[in-house]
Image (spheres, grey):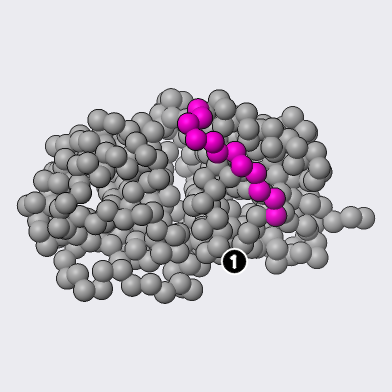
Amino acid sequence: MAKPKVIFVVGTRPDAIKSAPVVREFRRYGSQVETRLVSTGQHKEMLTQALNAFGLEADREYAAMQHGQGLSQLSARILNSLDECFAEESPDGVFAQGDTTTTFCASLAAFYRRIPFFHIEAGLRTTTVKDPFPEEFNRRATGLLADLHFAPTTLSRDNLLREGIDPRQIFVTGNSGIDAVKLVATNHHKEWYGNHPGPVIVVTTHRRENWGEPQVQVCRAIREVANQKPEALFVVAMHRNPLVRETLQSHLAGLANVDLIEPPDYADFVKLMERMSFALTDSGGVQEEAPAFGKPVLVLRNTTERPEGVTAGTAKLIGTSYEMVLTETLTLLENQSAYERMAKAVSPYGDGSSAQRIRYATLKWLGIETQKEEMWQ
């Protein structure tokens, strides 16, 4: 009997980062399962860099991203590419992670082909399908089509149960992003700002809902703090989207203690998180990863699908208004006890062993017994 084949679909840097530890784990069991890695090319350059950090490259690559296209055109290109891929590969299961357009299209293409779909990082939810846009729709729609749901936390599991998902299809594994961070931090060596004696604040902002005026407000606040606190260094990793870059450059360029940098490779960014004092970010991944190093996160959003960090105290929702960003940033710079409360809070997102749990549960579902792993919670 032929061994089963599974395909991991990735399209963006977060897809690559959080799928990589699971791909590596499955390839450890190559005598029992064939593992294929497919890239849609949604964010081709950043995705390739992230895969390289784990010694991986895609077995098949597509070119979904076209300059100036909207979500409809992107979705159509990804869906057509993956339908072609699944027809030719005939997998026994398809994996994708999180809430990207690639993930939703992978689940839909698998559904149309009647192929089982396995969702890594399942069950994250906000209160409205329109925020964040389009990610909240993507993860909810993916949840409707998934056969196995790998929830990072008990809260994510509970969200799925409320939506009527069979509890036998849900596994609480921890987040594979923590696996990735720990793996890279151990094996990669880079020093950031070794000669800078003061605090280092990392800034990332790229979400669609923050384009325009919200990012202008954030930049104004950063500029004010930078002027008040010359000992603090703001490291702003500029997303490749030209609208985002234009806002950041027009409002922050020229300040001596603001370093506008190109998006670092994933491995370098992990070491930057190790070095930083705290983060200002609208990234979901940073909300999960920074607490693994004991670093507070000020979240530049009004809602988050990762409320566990807020509850645990590792993250704080501050929105994007000038007043809130200014006040909360100054608080962490001036109030040592406030900083330590966040820095010493225990990360709720995982222990670095989610890939093993996902491997065990999936292969057992496919009828293959491998080394048993107890679920995280």
Task: Tell me which segment is drawn in magenta.
Answer: 59-70
Relative to 99, does residue 274 appear above or below in the rendering? Answer: below
**Can residue 121 be spotted in the picture?**
no
Which residue is at the far left?
A: 228
- Image quadrant where residue 290 sits: bottom left
Asked if residue 145 lies left or right of residue 219, the reply is right
Q: Position of residue 17 (x, y in %)?
A: 52, 55
SS label for mark 1: loop
Identify the residue shown where x is 16% and y is 40%: 220
Residue 62 falls inside the magenta stretch: yes
The N terminus is located in which quarter? bottom right
Relative to 334, does residue 62 appear above or below in the rendering? Answer: above
Q: Could you tell me how many numbered marks the image carries?
A: 1
Identify the residue shown where x is 74% and y is 65%: 29
**For this rendering, which residue is in front, 374 or 276?**
276
Relative to 140, does residue 191 appear above or below in the rendering? Answer: below
Which residue is at the far right?
A: 1
